[in-house]
Amino acid sequence: MIDKDRAMTGQARFELFAFWRTSATYRVRVALNLKGVVAEERIVDIDAGEHRSEAYLAINPLGAIPALIDRGAGQSRAPLTQSLAILEFIEELYPEPAILPPDPHGRARVRSLAAMLAADTHPLITPRVRKYLTSQGGFDDAAWRAWQTHWFTTGLQAVEHRLASEAETGAFCHGETITIADICLASILAVLRIFKIEVPAIPTIERIMRSCEAHPAFAKAAPLAQPGAPR
Ligand SMILES: N[C@@H](CCC(=O)N[C@@H](CS)C(=O)NCC(=O)O)C(=O)O
């Protein structure tokens, strides 16, 4: 584990604002684990509304988790938000093991798969969307569940189609090593399981998930393994 900063200053270099079941935090945890980087987690309890508190809105005005603070070199910097930006930041600081391919086409493919999941699927099922639809849009629990199932299915079956038909797919989404695409895929599958939603006909995704879940970086980041998770 890279924790030279704690040895020098008594605190880890990174502070991660996190909650056990959030998909976007899971992505950051997996990347940190893969690179062997330590972050101190600060729990922001979404169920208790802490993400809408004045203190957290000062960190991320969108009220979304995660946020990462880099306390390195004693400098005061603005918190980093948006899991995809944070993953690329971690990759640039700690290039090994790489989570982006070395070639431009490969990087574009991985970023495109990641965006299908993290930018085009995940935002539709967040608590803020649920809150709006149930308070302003007349949704009851059944309608919300149908909405979640529809958007998870739409996103994952589109990703399945690409993974099953594109030659670059290997043991993982892109070749034989873990990339940001696998991290985003696993993050969506993790919440799918928490919500107990079944998406049919995604065999390539299920195969890749078995490879990811066998890796300790994913197992250690699993929602149910985090502080605050239900036993
Ligand atoms: N695009 C953002 C999404 C962040 C996000 O929406 N996080 C969720 C948890 S996974 C959240 O904090 N939701 C609070 C809400 O929707 O009110 C990212 O990738 O970091």
Image: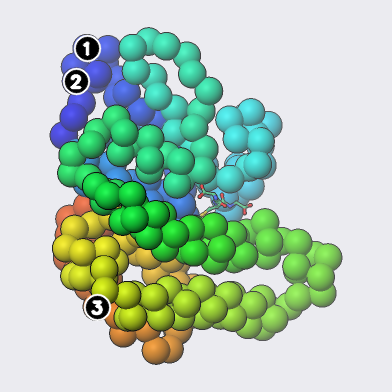
Q: Residue at x 44, y 27 (%)?
A: 69
Disc 3 C-beta below 8 A from ligand 1: no
Q: Residue at x 44, y 33 (%)?
A: 68
Is residue 213 in view from this perspective? Answer: no
Residue 8: give its label: 1
Per the model, the C-alpha gap separating discs 2 and 1 is: 6 Å
Question: For numbered disc 3, what is the local secondary structure?
Answer: helix
Q: Position of residue 162 (x, y in %)?
A: 39, 75
Q: Position of residue 102 (x, y in %)?
A: 24, 47
Residue 207: give its label: 3
Per the model, the C-alpha gap separating discs 1 and 3 is: 43 Å
Would you call the spot at circle 2 few (<14 residues within 10 Å), some (14-19), or many (20 or more)? some
| Residue at mark 2 | 4
Is residue 7 in view from this perspective? Answer: yes
- Left or right: 113 with respect to 6? right
Q: Are marks 2 and 1 in contact (CB under 8 Å)?
A: yes
Q: Residue at x 42, y 73 (%)?
A: 159
Residue 16: which quarter of the image? top left
Specify the amino acid type for callout 2.
Lys
Question: For numbered disc 2, what is the local secondary structure?
Answer: helix
Specify the amino acid type for callout 1.
Met
Q: Nearer the viewer, mark 1 or mark 3?
A: 3
The correct choice, above or below, for 147 with respect to 133 in the image is below
Of residues 227 and 54, which is closer to you in this image? 54
Question: For numbered disc 1, what is the local secondary structure?
Answer: helix
| 2 or 3: tag closer to the N-terminus | 2
Residue most extreme to the bottom: 201
Residue 166: which quarter of the image? bottom left
The correct choice, above or below, for 66 with respect to 190 in the image is above
Would you call the spot at circle 3 few (<14 residues within 10 Å), some (14-19), or many (20 or more)? few
Disc 2 C-beta below 8 A from ligand 1: no
Q: Residue at x 58, y 75 (%)?
A: 151
